Image (cartoon, grey):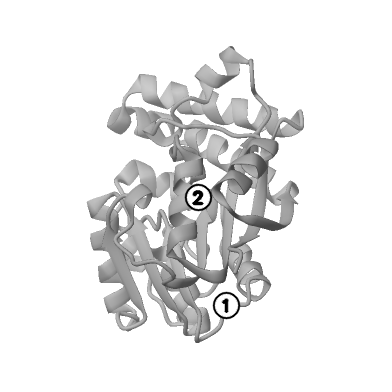
């Protein structure tokens, strides 16, 4: 991604993180691919996702867990569509609004502070809802899916990218993976996602697995923590630093064992 080419200046956003986090982000993505994502996605994912989901100027998109707004602004800039983000973190919402304003995309975007389990939107509002590697922070995914279903228009699309895990009964691994990014994590297998989506009322249309690039991103996160461990420990504490090194080592091991992957799940709301 070239910032000048798409008309969005992410350079200010890059300076908002702490010194340790800036080192981590630069190691993982570099400057050009850092659009404010706190996940495993890259601009390449978004460039593939946009035509796949048929996002165009008339599409109204909901971004569930929009974070600092980088991916939402990227999509709005690329397509001319309208994007509404819902984010529980006040700092994330403030940063998102500032990024959109500075990019001249204030009219196309709206970022809302709130819980995605109880969204401040009326029924049948959105053509498309997306979520990018944040599903694991929701303990009640069936409840979340029902809320997404409520705000989608009939025949609307729900597409989310999420890690999927086969760790049922493996308590040692669950403990090692319990709090990625200092946030409690609630993991599901692909089969569990299927059941919860169908229980919520969605019709599953397509599931795609990402393997090679996903492994690269997981390894990049772990390598960044190891490379900058001293600086990170000074800022975030030694216990947290050691925990995250083990977290990403465990994650990578699960990927190599075929017990963890990254899936794009595309569903539709029945008419």
Residue 23 is left or right of residue 102, and the answer is right
User: Is 205 placed left or right of 107 in the picture?
Assistant: right
Residue under the image location 28 percent in, 49 percent down:
89
Identify the element where label 1 is drawn. Answer: loop
Which mark is first along the chain, 2 or 1? 1
Give how far across and how far down residue 146 sits, in percent.
Answer: 48, 51
x then y, percent, for residue 219:
62, 39
Percent x, y of residue 3: 47, 75
Q: Quadrant of residue 62?
A: bottom left
Please say whether residue 79 is visible from this viewpoint. Answer: yes
113 or 103, which is in the foreground? 113
Query: Which x, y percent locates residue 97?
Result: 27, 69
Q: Can residue 14 be seen by looking at this rendering?
A: no
Give the vertical position of 94 relative to 171 (above or below). Answer: below
The residue identified by callout 1 is 55
Q: Is residue 182 above or below residue 43?
A: above
Tell which of 69 and 3 is nearer to you.
Answer: 69
Which residue carries the number 2 mark? Answer: 145
Query: Callout 1 environment at 10 Å: few (<14), some (14 to 19), or many (20+)?
Result: many
In which quadrant is the C terminus drawn?
bottom right
């Amino acid at each position: 991604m070239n910032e000048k080419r798409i008309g969005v200046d992410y350079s200010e956003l890059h300076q908002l993180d702490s010194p340790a986090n800036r080192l981590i982000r630069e190691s993982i993505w570099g400057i050009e691919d850092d659009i404010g994502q706190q996940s495993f996605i890259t601009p390449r994912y978004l460039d593939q996702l946009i035509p796949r989901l048929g996002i165009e100027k008339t599409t109204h998109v909901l971004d569930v867990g929009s974070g600092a707004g980088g991916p939402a602004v990227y999509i709005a800039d690329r397509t001319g569509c309208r994007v509404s983000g819902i984010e529980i973190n006040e700092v994330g919402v403030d940063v998102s609004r500032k990024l959109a304003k500075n990019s001249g995309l204030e009219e196309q975007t709206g970022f809302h502070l709130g819980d995605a389990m109880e969204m401040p939107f009326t029924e049948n509002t959105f053509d498309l809802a997306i979520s990018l590697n944040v599903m694991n922070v929701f303990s009640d995914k069936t409840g979340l899916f029902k809320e997404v279903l409520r705000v989608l228009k009939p025949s609307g699309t729900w597409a989310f990218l999420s890690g999927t895990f086969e760790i049922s009964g493996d308590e040692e691994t669950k403990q090692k993976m319990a709090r990625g990014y200092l946030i409690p994590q609630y993991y599901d297998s692909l089969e569990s996602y299927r059941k919860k989506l169908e229980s919520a009322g969605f019709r599953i249309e397509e599931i795609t697995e990402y393997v090679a690039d996903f492994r690269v991103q997981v390894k990049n996160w772990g390598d960044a923590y190891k490379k900058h461990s001293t600086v990170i420990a000074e800022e975030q504490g030694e216990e947290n630093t050691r925990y995250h090194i083990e977290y990403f080592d465990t994650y990578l091991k699960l990927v190599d064992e075929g017990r963890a992957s990254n899936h794009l799940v595309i569903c539709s709301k029945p008419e």
